[in-house]
Image: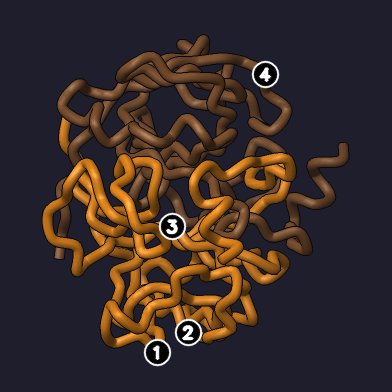
Chain colours: A orange, B brown
Amino acid sequence: MNFILKPIGIIHTPFIDKSQTPIQPVRSREVGQVCVFKEFSDGLQDLDGFSHIILVYLFHQSNGYSLRVKPFLDDQLRGLFATRHPNRPNPIGLSVVRLIGRQENILHIEGVDMLDGTPLLDIKPFVPDFDLRLNATSGWYAQRSQE
Amino acid sequence: MNFILKPIGIIHTPFIDKSQTPIQPVRSREVGQVCVFKEFSDGLQDLDGFSHIILVYLFHQSNGYSLRVKPFLDDQLRGLFATRHPNRPNPIGLSVVRLIGRQENILHIEGVDMLDGTPLLDIKPFVPDFDLRLNATSGWYAQRSQE
């Protein structure tokens, strides 16, 4: 069963080129705008109360994939699914960003790490009961992120 | 620009019917298995060090969508994108689950909330630096989840 995705908007960020995107979005303070296509505006109601949202988007500049990759933070090959590398069988990206505010169909966000012009697939509220795991351990990332 | 998704595996859970799936997965202790198609096995290396993974999957029993929905936890209509309702323009689901262990191309997981037979699109490691937001506030969910 295959399924066709259709963008619901476009994400605008300061990052024109892959080399500019931050590796660890939690440390990014860069702001951006999510321009949701007007036909979907009604679905944005009630988002305002959430401090953070999850953006689901296409890695639109991804180009094929390998099952073993050398991540940006590492110097050895890792299994693709143990990384957040953009080249994946289904090139879907996830980022948690801070929601600064909304003007009709435009969301102002902080902490962006995706490329300018990224096609948006979905917006989900970040809900601590669903999304927080305080005791999570992070494999090979744990070492690398402290360097 | 449209994009075609292709499942990379199937998620098995105890939930045969939509009415059985838990509303708040963080409280679920149900176990399941992720059966990744063998052609993608090599991509699972190095996953073992992570306590939690993010499963990206299709809401395969979703059927159309409305931009205003009454969520399971609520009694009034909310904007679709302020909910985690399964009927969405792009019916992509996200769940953070605990990784119990791996046997070749099968992952044993705990805390499942999706239907048995769910098509898997991607696996990402849960990385606190990327995914944790300790100070997040959760809009209309905040009230409802305490009831």
Q: Badge 4 sits on which subunit? A: B
Say which of marks 2 and 1 sits in front.
1
Q: Amino acid at mark 3?
A: Leu
Distance Cα–Cα, label 3 vs label 2: 15 Å
Q: Chain of mark 2?
A: A
Residue with the most extreme right position = B147
Q: Nearer the viewer, residue A99 or A24?
A: A24
Image height of A66 relative to B36, above or below: below
Which one is in front, B103 or B131? B103
Q: Is residue A45 visible?
A: yes
User: Is residue A122 visible from the viewing direction of this image?
Assistant: no
Q: Residue at 54% of width from left, 27% of height from top?
A: B99
- Give the mark, 3 or 1, whose residue is nearer the N terminus: 1
Are labels 4 and 2 on one chain? no
- Determine which of the numbered discs, if any, sits on residue A32 in the image: 2
Same subunit, tags 3 and 1: yes
Q: Amino acid at mark 2?
A: Gly
Q: Which mark is residue A14?
A: 1
Cα separation between marks 3 and 4: 25 Å
Identify the disc placed on residue A94: 3
Query: Measured from the top left, where is residue A66 in percent x and y?
Result: 17, 47
* Disc 4 crowd, CA 10 A, few/some/many (<14, 14-19, 20+): some
Please state, as top left, top right, bottom left or bottom right, where the N terminus of chain A lies in the image.
top left
- Tell me whether the residue at label 2 lies in contact with that at label 1, contact meaning CB atoms closer than 8 angstroms: yes
Q: Are marks 4 and 1 on the same chain?
A: no
Disc 3 secondary structure class? strand
- From this view, report whether residue B29 is shown above or below residue A56: above
Query: In the rendered image, which residue does mark 4 sit on?
Result: B29
Label 1 is found on which chain of the structure? A
User: Given the image, on which type of amino acid does mark 4 rest?
Assistant: Arg
